[in-house]
């Protein structure tokens, strides 16, 4: 980097500190405001040591129960140990390794099981991303200025903020992706020195990463491809060290890989759901845009706002990658290109060849997003200090607008009750409001819809304690024994609606547009 950039980096550091403080603040403020959604509810009963099967056997009994009867499965107790938590994960959710969940269980034992307490651990873990991206920037660009700028970008990234307030393992995985990438770059750089400690660090990050999220294997694969290409397809010391380290990490993960095979890798079959090619690419490109600026806009309801925003962000990302390829050494741009492309192609190609929507799941592409962000950081860091006056002013103005839009995104996210990442539970605030404002109410639900069980657990966090629930096994008719003023149904099957209309002489009317909430009303 030029001396001019180094001189000007001091005011930049002040701005970065302000943005860093803002990013930390936003991670913890209103941490319990958003609904405790479907996936988070699953997290809670997993770490409590329960399985879906036993919970359903206790609540889907066609008898009235209370909100408390559901909530008891969302908290740890003395009857269920960490062994039960591990067993629940192994039996029903092998696709998610246990490291994060066991950490969260120990955390809950100390700080409680409220949504705020549970999410706080994730928020704290997300802070580790700041020093991690700084280290990676040093290894990639040999520039502390870019390291500071990278900290600023991830601090106010709406994508990272969303996952920092989510009781899932993706913030921890983001940290591991960055640390493992920095560690292998460091190990390769010091190939001629006694550098066993660097390969040991890399190996530890891989093991932790695999037991956090299995897609760490794709990141390690990207590292291997990079190493082979950059070393000219020769069997160097670094390549041998990589193969040994990866093999040891993989062997250490085989116990849980065996667990996953026993589960037949279930839990991911929904990824094969058919979708159109246009819808596939629209979602992928929209997700990339949301990593940088996210106002929770929908292309169908706000096309005049969505398309210009998405196109602008995509142009920025594409140009930053182009810029890096022509302004950095091969060992830098090649590493970035390989991480981005391998991660995306491993999901996009199966979708295009066999159908499905694997590549539309934003959390799967976190490694690609992280390195896209680094590319954008490098572009801004170089251009805002350009020797060309017009270019410098243009990019400084662009950065100012970009930063302002990013901060506005984070502010909106911080004050929202739900967001697009919480599908299928993002309509719960409206549903909860309708039910809680009604008097003498009964909520009926069956187990026919795919997400009914998880949505029911999610709703139980905010439903009024006086609300009664009647949960019906599939194909049974609800045994409505009391004269309630309001009888609601949560995403009822068509067959159930027909049976109720026939047996009660009432009409089942949709009162929530997405089709989740219905009401039993008297025929006029």
Image: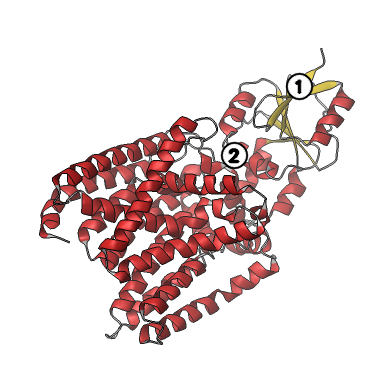
**Mark 2 or mark 1: whose residue is earlier in sequence:** 2
Q: Residue at x 67, y 33 (%)?
A: 516
Measured from the top left, where is residue 17 in percent x and y?
23, 48
Measured from the top left, where is residue 226 in percent x and y?
40, 73
Measured from the top left, where is residue 82 in percent x and y?
58, 62
Q: Residue at x 58, y 45 (%)?
A: 279
**What's the distance in space between the residues labelled 2 and 1, CA to CA?**
26 Å
Q: Nearer the viewer, residue 307 or 254?
A: 307
In the picture, measured across the screen, residue 29 lies left or right of residue 254, that is left
Q: What residue is shown with label 1?
A: 484
Q: Quadrant of residue 231?
A: bottom left
In the picture, measured across the screen, residue 278 lies left or right of residue 365, that is right
In the picture, measured across the screen, residue 157 lies left or right of residue 451, that is left
Measured from the top left, where is residue 90 in percent x and y?
64, 64
Q: What residue is shown with label 2?
A: 425
Q: Quadrant of residue 347?
A: bottom right
Q: Secondary structure at mark 1?
A: loop
Q: Quadrant of residue 338?
A: bottom left
In the picture, measured across the screen, residue 244 lies left or right of residue 398, that is right
Q: Is disc 1 surrounded by few (<14), some (14 to 19) or many (20+) residues within 10 Å?
A: few
Quadrant showing the C terminus: top right
């Amino acid at each position: 980097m030029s001396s001019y950039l180094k001189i000007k980096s001091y005011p930049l550091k002040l701005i970065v500190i302000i943005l860093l403080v803002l990013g930390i603040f936003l991670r913890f403020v209103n941490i319990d405001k958003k609904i405790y959604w479907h996936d988070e509810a699953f997290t809670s009963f997993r770490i409590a040591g329960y399985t879906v099967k036993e919970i359903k056997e206790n609540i889907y009994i066609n008898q009235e129960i209370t909100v408390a009867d559901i909530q008891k499965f969302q908290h740890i107790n003395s009857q269920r140990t960490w062994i039960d938590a591990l067993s629940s994960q192994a039996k029903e959710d092998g696709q998610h390794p246990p490291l994060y969940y066991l950490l969260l269980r120990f955390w809950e034992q100390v700080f409680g099981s409220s949504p705020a307490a549970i999410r706080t651990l994730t928020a704290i873990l997300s802070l580790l991303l700041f020093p991690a991206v700084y280290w990676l920037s040093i290894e990639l660009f040999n520039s502390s200025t870019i390291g500071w700028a990278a900290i600023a970008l991830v601090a106010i990234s709406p994508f990272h903020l969303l996952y920092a307030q989510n009781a899932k393992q993706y913030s921890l995985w983001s940290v591991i992706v960055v640390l493992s990438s920095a560690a292998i770059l460091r190990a390769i750089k010091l190939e001629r020195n006694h550098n066993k400690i660097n390969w040991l660090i890399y190996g530890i990050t891989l093991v932790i990463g695999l037991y956090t999220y299995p897609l760490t294997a794709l990141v390690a694969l990207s590292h291997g491809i990079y190493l082979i290409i950059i070393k000219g397809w020769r069997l160097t010391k670094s390549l041998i060290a990589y193969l040994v380290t990866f093999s040891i990490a993989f062997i250490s993960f085989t116990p849980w890989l065996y667990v996953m095979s026993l589960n037949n890798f279930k839990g991911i079959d929904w990824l094969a759901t058919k979708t159109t090619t246009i819808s596939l690419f629209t979602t992928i490109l929209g997700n990339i845009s949301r990593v940088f600026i996210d106002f929770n806009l929908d292309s169908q309801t706000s096309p005049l706002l969505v398309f210009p925003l998405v196109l602008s962000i995509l142009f920025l990302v594409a140009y930053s990658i182009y810029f890096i390829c022509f302004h950095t050494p091969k060992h830098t741009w090649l590493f970035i290109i390989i991480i981005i492309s391998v991660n995306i192609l491993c999901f996009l190609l199966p979708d295009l060849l066999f159908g499905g929507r694997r590549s539309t799941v934003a959390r799967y592409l976190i490694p690609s997003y992280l390195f896209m962000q680094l590319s954008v950081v490098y572009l801004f860091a170089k251009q805002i200090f350009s020797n060309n006056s017009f270019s410098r002013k243009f990019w400084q103005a662009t950065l100012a607008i970009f930063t302002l839009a990013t901060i506005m995104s984070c502010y909106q996210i911080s004050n929202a009750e739900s967001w697009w990442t919480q599908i299928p539970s993002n309509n719960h605030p409206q549903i909860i409001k309708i039910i809680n404002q009604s008097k003498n109410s009964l909520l009926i639900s069956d187990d026919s819809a795919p997400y009914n069980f998880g949505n029911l657990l999610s709703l139980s966090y905010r439903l009024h304690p006086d609300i009664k629930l009647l949960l019906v096994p599939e194909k049974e008719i609800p045994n409505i024994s009391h004269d309630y003023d309001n009888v609601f149904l949560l995403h009822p099957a068509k067959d159930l609606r027909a049976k109720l209309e026939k047996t009660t002489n009432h009409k089942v009317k949709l009162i929530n547009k997405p089709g989740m909430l219905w009401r039993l009303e008297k025929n006029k």
